[in-house]
Amino acid sequence: MPNDTTPSIADALDKVRNRIALAAHAANRDPADITLVAVSKTKPVALVRDALDHGQRDFGENYLQDALAKIDALTEREPLWHFIGDIQSNKTRDIASNFSWAHAIDRFKIARRLSDQRPEGYAPLNLCIQVNIDGEASKSGIAPSDVAELADQIVELEHVKLRGLMTIPAPSTDEASQRKPFAALRELMQRLNDRGHDLDTLSMGMSADLEAAIAEGATHVRVGTDIFGARDA
Ligand SMILES: *Cc1c(COP(=O)(O)O)cnc(C)c1O
């Protein structure tokens, strides 16, 4: 039995959905245009099942072995799995066969392997390029000046679809500074589209900054802690 000191996944999801709706309305956006990716990394399959029971469909994972066990256990529920972590070459086959999205693409070699290894008959794997939008603050992702070249290469691949950009900015507490890197990612995607790309996805915003991300156009927010609770370090 849940007790009142441990909020249920259903309550936590309702709170996060409410935050998304409020932020969307404040930005004159339709909340339906924002996908909540529930980041279940390190969390047990039972909690993912609770979230599925409460209408959650999209889940984010970073650790492949941990993810594959949950994916196997939940196949008949048909969740949509997003791989949101860095990808090494030896992981591409399993990611290409088990996920719908990969959010943290930072080199062509990985995108090419994912395309080559996408199983016959599957829809293209949706990809986002991870951008190190605020320079030295984070070590993950590529420099904004390198994004156009990688995007031009990825769109030539047959079994992946380049959907947009992803970023994890340095943490900050006030909304004005949170918004700056998100605005920069939005502007970068706009420049790519002005050059002929057809990108529709900004994967940005987590538990602590989803409002700022939505204000700047996030289409996918990746929320872990505020749904499933704190993770062990
Ligand atoms: C863990 C993780 C998240 C979720 O972060 P929270 O602060 O727990 O909401 C989002 N995106 C990525 C890439 C992550 O690794």
Image (tube, rainbow, N blue to C red):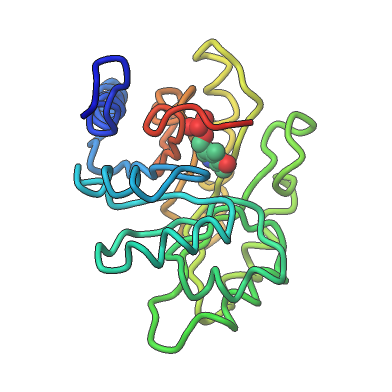
Answer whether residue 187 is visible to the viewer in this image.
no
Q: Residue 5: where, in percent of width, then height?
A: 31, 15
Q: How many marks?
A: 0
Question: Which is more toward the observer, 232 or 86?
Answer: 232
Residue lying at the far bottom in this picture: please name it.
Answer: 120
Q: Residue 39: where, in percent of width, then height?
A: 45, 42
Question: Which is more toward the observer, 2 or 71?
Answer: 2
Position of the N terminus by quadrant: top left
Judged left or right of residue 144, residue 4 is left
Residue shown at 27%/28% (left/top)? Answer: 8
Question: Which is more toward the observer, 128 or 46?
Answer: 46
Q: Residue 190: where, in percent of width, then height?
A: 51, 46
Judged left or right of residue 84, residue 233 is right
Residue shown at 32%/21% (left/top)? Answer: 6
Residue shown at 57%/61% (left/top)? Answer: 65
Quarter assignment of residue 217: top left
Residue lying at the far front in this picture: please name it.
Answer: 1
Answer whether residue 7 is visible to the viewer in this image.
yes
Q: Residue 189: where, in percent of width, then height?
A: 53, 47
Quarter assignment of residue 121: bottom left
Judged left or right of residue 50, residue 116 is right
Judged left or right of residue 144, residue 125 is left
Position of the C terminus by quadrant: top right
Quarter assignment of residue 181: top right
Examine the rendered structure and indicate whether residue 32 appears above or below residue 13.
below
